[in-house]
Image (cartoon, helix red, strand yellow):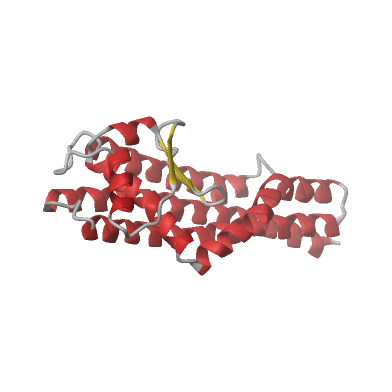
Amino acid sequence: MFFDPTYILMVFLPTLLITGLAQLWVSSAYRKWSHIQNSRRITGYDTAQALMRGGLIQQVGVEVGGSELSDHYDPTKGIVRLSPGVASQPSIASMAIAAHEFGHVQQHQQHSPLMAMRSALVPGAKLGSGLGFTLIFLGMILNFMGLALIGLILFAATTVFTFVTLPVELDASRRALILLRESGLLADKQDEQGARAVLTAAAFTYVAAVATSLLTLLYYAMIVFGGRSRD
């Protein structure tokens, strides 16, 4: 499968292009706006504290650690984890990224149905990403199409997960801008422009993930059902 020309044309090259553009866009936006100080001169960590003080978000834990742009919210522990750069820099990018994670906090605290659905899909997505291809491969090698079909269904769970994740992330970015405005942290047009640019670039990485997963699923489906038609 790895050397199948169809795979290269249908999955590998489009995926390389889409993910490459997404990473280029997000790294370019982050690099630009991480060097421009926000008007309030507050770090990502300060942004987190300001959003909680404003009463729009209930108190959650905030930890600092991890690699660059590894920022995330852990709903199981109620903790926002900020990367050291985001936590310590008083840039527009840091403010926007921290606010995005608190957009997720607000989703969780307001019991967002989409976020609940995404959390419920996590186990299946992990299983599908790890086991789906293996079962498809074994099914094709052993000419056991039932096994390959199970693998396809498992992998489909990862695609469903990416589809659900996209609106969750878009909504978190929308909430982030609202939180920043209502907390008075977007003091001028440059703050708003920069925050929107960073959040939009980050959102495109999830669009790329959807496209990549869907193309891969379609390719696997073509192999599985093509194999069945030859039986």
Place residue 39 in its image quadrant: top left
- Residue 52, given in percent of the width and then of the height, sits at 33, 52
Residue at 30% from the left image edge and 51% from the top image edge: 53
Q: Quadrant of the C terminus?
A: bottom right
- Residue 127, given in percent of the width and then of the height, sits at 71, 50
Q: Is residue 167 depicted above or below 5 in this figure?
A: below
Q: How many numbered markers are drawn?
A: 0
Q: Quadrant of the N terminus?
A: top right
Q: Is residue 49 visible?
A: yes
Q: Is residue 215 depicted above or below 3 in this figure?
A: below
List the single residue furthest toward the left: 188
- Residue 191, given in percent of the width and then of the height, sits at 17, 49
**Is 224 on the left-hand or right-hand side of 187?**
right
Residue at 54% from the left image edge and 57% from the top image edge: 162
Residue at 83% from the left image edge and 51% from the top image edge: 139
Q: Nearer the viewer, residue 76 or 178?
A: 76
Q: Nearer the viewer, residue 231 or 162?
A: 162
Place residue 161 in its image quadrant: bottom right
- Residue 24, given in percent of the width and then of the height, sits at 35, 40
List the single residue furthest toward the bottom: 113
**Is 12 on the left-hand or right-hand side of 43?**
right
Q: Nearer the viewer, residue 215 or 71?
A: 71
